[in-house]
Amino acid sequence: MLSQTLCTSFKAQVLLGVHDFRAVGGDTFKLALYTATATLGADTTQYTSTGEVVGGNYPAGGIALSNLGVVTDTAGWQGVTSFGNATFSNVTLTARGALIYNTTPSAADADGVALVNPAVCVLDFGEDKAISASNFVVQFPANAGNTAIIRIT
């Protein structure tokens, strides 16, 4: 089961300065695709291969995202960020959702434990999405106050 959510561990890590969402010089974030058998939600703390899509030209661990940087939305009193659309080229797969995770964390967690591929958020596509020998595109919303994929209020 997939639950659309920001991961709880991510919320604490933001306060610790673990994630750098700058468009230039920031951390590398990846998008991994998952089947309906995956169990991902608020309690997901890091990337896992359990339930991840396999085969059909899909790269294990997913693909790197293009970070659009951080925007301050003073009207909505929030900081936001989003990514450019992610294209998995020439794949055959069925995906129910995805996990955004950081491959280059710059710190440890609150307990001093080194972070490895910490989770940011889980995406639920609402239904299985299938494609055969074609491009699978995950479209991200605009990097603005009411639309960005990550909004901290």
Image: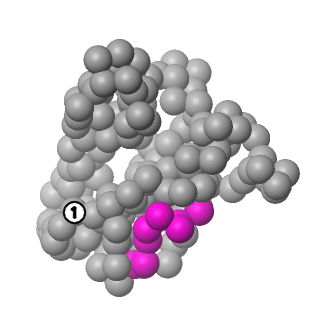
The quarter holding residue 74 reads: top left
Q: Nearer the viewer, residue 61 or 133?
A: 61
Q: Which residues are magenta?
A: 38-45
In the rendered view, would you say 54 is above or below 73? below
Task: State yes or no: residue 108 in magenta.
Answer: no
In the rendering, at what x and y percent does residue 33 appear?
Answer: 36, 63
Give the residue displayed 45% in from the left and 43% down from the top.
64
In the rendered view, would you say 52 is above or below 147? below
Q: Nearer the viewer, residue 30 or 119?
A: 119
Give the amino acid at mark 1. Phe
Quadrant of the image containing the C terminus = top left
Give the residue displayed 49% in from the left and 78% down from the top.
50
In the rendered view, would you say 96 is above or below 17? below
In the rendering, at what x and y percent does residue 35 appear?
Answer: 32, 76
Give the residue displayed 51% in from the left and 23% down from the top.
22
Quadrant of the image containing the N terminus = bottom left
Local crowd at mark 1 within 10 Å, few (<14), some, or many (≥20)?
Answer: some
Residue located farthest toward the bottom when viewing the structure as drawn: 37
In the rendering, at what x and y percent does residue 136 appear?
Answer: 21, 55
Q: Colour mode? A: one colour
Q: Which residue is mark 1?
A: 125
In the rendered view, would you say 144 is above or below 84? above
Helix, strand or loop at label 1? It is: strand
Helix, strand or loop: magenta stretch: loop
In the displayed structure, does residue 89 sit left or right of residue 27? left
Give the residue displayed 58% in from the left and 31% down from the top.
20
